[in-house]
Amino acid sequence: MTPVVELEGVCKDFGAYRALDGVSLSVRPGESVGLLGPNGAGKTTLIHIMLGLITPSAGRVRLFGLEMPAQRRMILGKLNFSSAYVQMPLSLTPRQNLRVFAGLYGVADPGRKIDELLERVELSEMADRPTRALSSGQLSRLNLAKAMLNDPQLLLLDEPTASMDPDIADKTRNLLKRIQSEKGIALLYTSHNMREIEAMARPAWAHWVRPAR
């Protein structure tokens, strides 16, 4: 079975600063993998490399057996991304935001898909209010709905519960577990919190992203 993620000796330098130093890992279909490390360890940089937003200084990146960045266009149709640090336009409603992304992703029958996702993430009642009215937990769930629009085989999740109250973080993790169980998708989940990594669905393992020296 072809891994959905294969990283071999990935390094990233920003001038004289080495942000990543020889990261290697593999993620199988349906597997949940945690990237664990302190702030500044390079977890977000690694996610950005897998999205093709930046190129590694050394090493090899393959997703779904395809080379990144050479086959980026084919790869991006099979994955999606959610982060607590990425904000949608606050003046638009959740429904409008999802419709914009559905257009970018080429989603067929976007109205039906958006209604289905809003219900799944428990945002139907907020769907037509300004996004600025949403709480932090609701914003995170809206980001997850966005990330599910194209039915991805892999979800890249960058600190998806950052700055949340514990009960809201638990609710978000439970939602992720349900999505993974129902869809059979792979999750790559970054956090600096070991307990959070341990709380994610099994099978799971933690890959320690150490700060580069």
Image (spheres, rainbow, N blue to C red):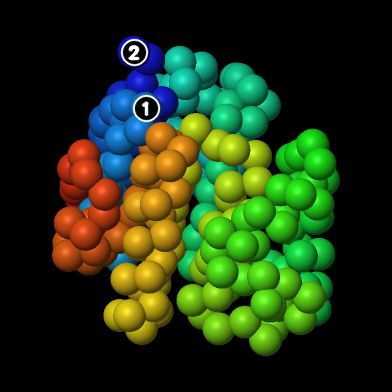
Label 2: element kind: loop
Q: Amino acid at mark 2?
A: Met
User: x, y (%) of residue 180?
Assistant: 40, 44
Q: Nearer the viewer, residue 141 or 13?
A: 141
Q: Residues within 10 Å of mark 1 (few under 14, many from 20)?
A: some
Q: Amino acid at mark 1?
A: Pro
Residue wearing tag 2? 1
Left-right relation of 160 to 149: left
Which residue lies at the image location 46% right of the left edge and 38% below the top edge? 183
Q: Which of the 4 image quarters holds residue 21?
A: top left
Q: Nearer the viewer, residue 37 or 78?
A: 78
Left-right relation of 121 to 190: right
Q: Which of the 4 image quarters holds residue 70?
A: top right
Which residue lies at the image location 45% right of the left edge and 15% below the top edge? 65
Residue wearing tag 1? 29
In this rendering, does residue 121 appear at all?
yes
User: x, y (%) of residue 30?
Assistant: 35, 33
Left-right relation of 55 to 101: left
User: x, y (%) of residue 188?
Assistant: 37, 44
Above or below, comparing residue 72 to residue 103 in the picture: above
